[in-house]
Amino acid sequence: MLTFKLQRQTVATLVGLSFLCILPMVSALALKDFIDYWNSLNYFYKFMVGAPLFFLFAAATGLDGGKNPAFLIQYRDAETVTSKDNPRVFFDIEIDGKKAGRIQMELFKTVTPKTAENFRALCTGEKGTGKSGKPLHYKGCNFHRVIPDFMLQGGDFTRFNGTGGESIYGEKFGDEWWEEGYGKELYITHNSPGMLSMANSGKNTNGSQFFITTKRCKWLDCKHVVFGQVEDGWNVVKAIEALGSASGTPSKKVIIADCGELKKFKLPKKVINGDYEGKWEVDGLDIVQARMKKDEEEEAEKLTKKLK
């Protein structure tokens, strides 16, 4: 488990700063004396006293727009919520009409059931047609935004440009956080490549668009809901990433040619009875190391060359 240390440190800093700023006021015990003292301060000193107090209050109560008070926010790594009972889905990818391979993903249904079910159903297409009049299905959808060393984004099956999409629950649905105990909610962190997370346009605006990280993206925590991870097919992810640009426009057309749910799938090693033991392994390699291994990069490069 990872705790949101940055916010806790920020709160501690604000408390200390506020205490130092308020020291001269301690002697002003009477309300009238306090008001007179406050009025005697110049604007700069009022700001130095008031601003830390405001931000401390906002951070402690959630009024800063966060989901929870700062000192109650906690994170879990993806490997602590993996399970053999979670659904597995797949994308069969085509790049400029040529088969590029399959991406297999695990969905964290046990901790983000609503978000995972939305993605699973959009992979199978079982919900039929949405309010937009378009099939609720990722099949034929493109990856419209690809930024190297960051992420791959897709899921807009209504407009195909990042401005559309629709969930199985209607156009949008709320952020889903995992509750554990009174007043405590947990977030799965973007702490490694291969995290499957919801794209949005702000708080509680989840639809069908998603992204797959290609690096550690901790700054996205609390802003985007992680609901799964890439389990196999990392070479395909890297081949797509190689087609990206700083603007996000891919150099080739990347399409989800087929998708669905896997009833039979390859489990990473060391996952026994749904319990996490050690580190994820794929073909005998630690998954994070495998993603960074030179042979993985070379395999992706070879695949990209074949598609040219």
Image: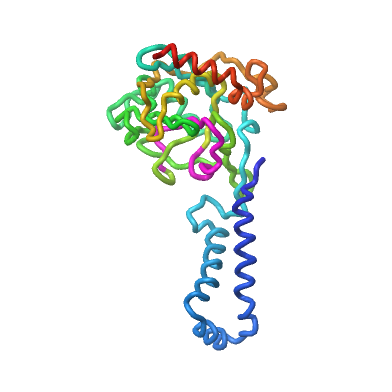
Extreme right residue here? Answer: 278
Of residue 200 and residue 84, the one placed in the foreground of this image is 200
Q: Residue at x 36, y 26 (%)?
A: 136
Q: Which residues are magenta?
A: 205-225
Q: Position of residue 252 (x, y in %)?
A: 36, 21
* Image-quadrant location for residue 52: bottom right
Residue 135 in the image: above or below residue 61: above
Q: Position of residue 17 (x, y in %)?
A: 61, 67
Of residue 231 and residue 185, the one placed in the foreground of this image is 231
Of residue 193 and residue 169, the one placed in the foreground of this image is 193
Relative to 144, 274 lies left or right: right
Q: Main secondary structure of the magenta part?
A: loop
Location of the N terminus (image quadrant): top right
Indicate whether residue 97 is drawn in magenta: no
* Image-quadrant location for residue 258: top left
Q: Residue at x 64, y 66 (%)?
A: 16
Whether residue 169 is visible to the viewer of this picture, yes or no, is: no
* Image-quadrant location for residue 199: top left
Extreme left residue here? Answer: 133
Location of the C terminus (image quadrant): top left
Indicate whether residue 213 is drawn in magenta: yes
Whether residue 13 is visible to the viewer of this picture, yes or no, is: yes
Q: Position of residue 155 (x, y in %)?
A: 39, 29
Tell me, what colour scheme is on the image? rainbow
Relative to 276, 146 lies left or right: left
Q: Residue at x 59, y 43 (%)?
A: 186
Q: Residue at x 49, y 17 (%)?
A: 301
Q: How many marks?
A: 0
Q: Position of residue 176 (x, y in %)?
A: 50, 40
Of residue 304 and residue 291, the one placed in the foreground of this image is 304
Residue 292 in the image: above or below residue 23: above
